[in-house]
Image (spheres, rainbow, N blue to C red):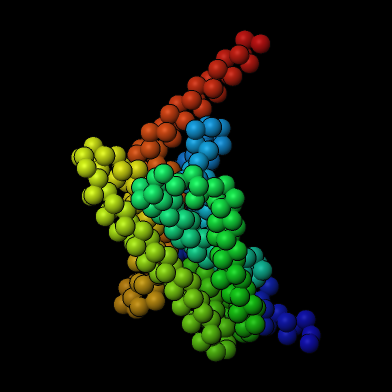
Amino acid sequence: MTRANLTVFHPAVFVLLGIPGLEAYHTWLSIPLCLMYITAVLGNSLLIVVIITERNLHEPMYFFLSMLAITDILLSTTTVPKALAIFWFHAHHIAFDACVTQVFFVHTMFVGESAILLAMAFDRFVAICAPLRYTAVLTWPVVGRTALAVVIRSFCIIFPVIFLLKRLPFCRTNVVPHSYCEHIGVARLACADITVNIWYGFSVPIVMVILDVILIAVSYSLILRAVFRLPSQDARHKALSTCGSHLCVILMFYVLSFFTLLTHRFGHNIPRHVHILLANLYVVVPPMLNPIVYGVKTKQIQEGVVHLFFDVKTWWCSASLG
């Protein structure tokens, strides 16, 4: 096969349009997007540093929380910088392999974050329903194997998407009406049957995420049953307060992600720019709010942040005097 034919089947670049229909507002839209991205990266980075440096946070719950923070940074960093480059510098081109890589990371982070939320729900279930067995059940080897299982599951579910995209011939157009590459949006540019892409790309990850949601719901139903059996009001309040942050994060992630996915799949009467705006909010709003929620609702993290800033201030003063 000649080089020309290869170019027809796999274009050298795709052209990302940004948000079609709102081109005149790209600069204005980039300002809140940029601010949310900076907040997400700084907030999650601070959360990771606090968890690493504070010894009293070296517990399974905070280990999973640090995994969630890493996932949030990767999710937003995979998409937002390219969107900002489109809005600011009109850098619409993205290489074919870079586009496929972006597809892989966006969907892997989505499935991975769902699995991490399930692991955190299991952690809260053991802590509240079987507190005396917590250290025996959630040992560090178990936590390590759980983390490895999250990574392997996410990779194995999304890795076939790479081959599903690479097998397609792209001989119609290379223009992607979006601010980043996502599986079905890229597959629809192909001049071939994409039934397999649609069924696998939509059904398999969604089935796995729905399974996660069901298991999380079961965990919290058992947690609530155990909490309401506690003898005192103070004990019930204390038990529920430990789950408040996690429930807020779960609601933010699943409500926004499912709304985005369902409107993209079934909302044919919704304008395209609304779909794309929702997709951009999905990759930046939960990563921005997660560290804020945990910072506001978790006393140990608040104390860790104060200690970190005090240590930095002490080091800065001693370095200045030296």
Q: Quadrant of the C terminus?
A: top right
> Percent x, y for residue 59?
50, 41
> Percent x, y for residue 293?
37, 43
- Can residue 85 be seen? no
- Can residue 218 be seen? yes
Farthest top residue? 321
> Percent x, y for residue 246?
37, 49
103 over 39 or under it: above or below: below
Give the residue drawn at x 34%, y 62%.
218
157 over 229 or under it: above or below: below
Q: Return the residue nearer the eye: 71 or 82.
A: 71
Give the residue drawn at x 52%, y 66%.
107
Question: Seen in the image, is 306 located left or right of residue 271?
Answer: right
Give the residue drawn at x 33%, y 76%.
267
Farthest right residue? 2
Q: Return the residue nearer the eye: 62 or 13.
A: 62
